Amino acid sequence: MGIVMFNLFLQLSLGSVWIRRRLMPFLLGLVLVAGGHLLLHPSAFSQTSQDSPRFANTPEQWIEVLFEEAPDGVDTSYDFIAKSDGYAVIPYVWGEGGGFVVLEESPEGWSNLCGSGGGLDGGNFFVEFCEMSLIDAQDLWNVYRTEYNAAYGEEL
């Protein structure tokens, strides 16, 4: 049954190309091997230090651990940490670039919720990418704007 379904799939996807029955087990095996390799290959799970599942007692400790993983000669810094009820946002500089990380407080400590290598464009990011509730996202965005304005002396 599986080979018949695979044959039908190939016929539909390749159009009028006819696949011989003798080739079906070979093609099915090839697809399974290639698919398995892609699913299990480490590069399919690109993990950055920002994504690692670590916990810290404070957001300050969390970002310092992240900075310790920077290669020699790479400058790292942050200007402020915006904390609201159970969440924190830390915009940081990493070499020539940077980004921000959103941390979440749990009984184990502070851990990474989400982040991005770039600028923060409004509180909707927290809802769409961090899956925060609208109220929590709005609170965190308001705290972030206040801290940003104080750190850089300009309105966000």
Image (cartoon, rainbow, N blue to C red):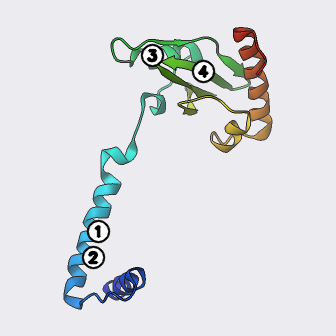
Quarter where residue 11 is shown: bottom left
Question: Mark 4–mark 2 contact, CB under 8 Å?
Answer: no
* Amino acid type indicated by mark 4: Pro
Rate crowding at label 1 as few (under 14), some (14 to 19) or many (20 or more) other CA atoms within 10 Å.
few
Picture coordinates of residue 72 (x, y %)? 33, 13
Tell me the SS state at disc 2: helix
Label 3 or label 1, whichever comes before in sequence order = 1
Label 1 or label 4, whichever comes before in sequence order = 1
Q: Is residue 62 visible?
A: no
Tell me the SS state at disc 4: strand
Residue found 69% across the figure and 18% down from its top: 82
The residue to which callout 3 is attached is: 67
The residue to which callout 4 is attached is: 91
Picture coordinates of residue 40 (x, y %)? 31, 53
In the foreground, 156 or 134: 156
* Amino acid type indicated by mark 3: Phe
* Amino acid type indicated by mark 2: Leu
Question: Mark 1–mark 2 contact, CB under 8 Å?
Answer: yes
Picture coordinates of residue 87 (x, y %)? 67, 26
Residue found 58% across the figure and 26% down from its top: 100
Q: Quadrant of the C terminus?
A: top right
Question: Residue 28, which numbered label?
Answer: 2
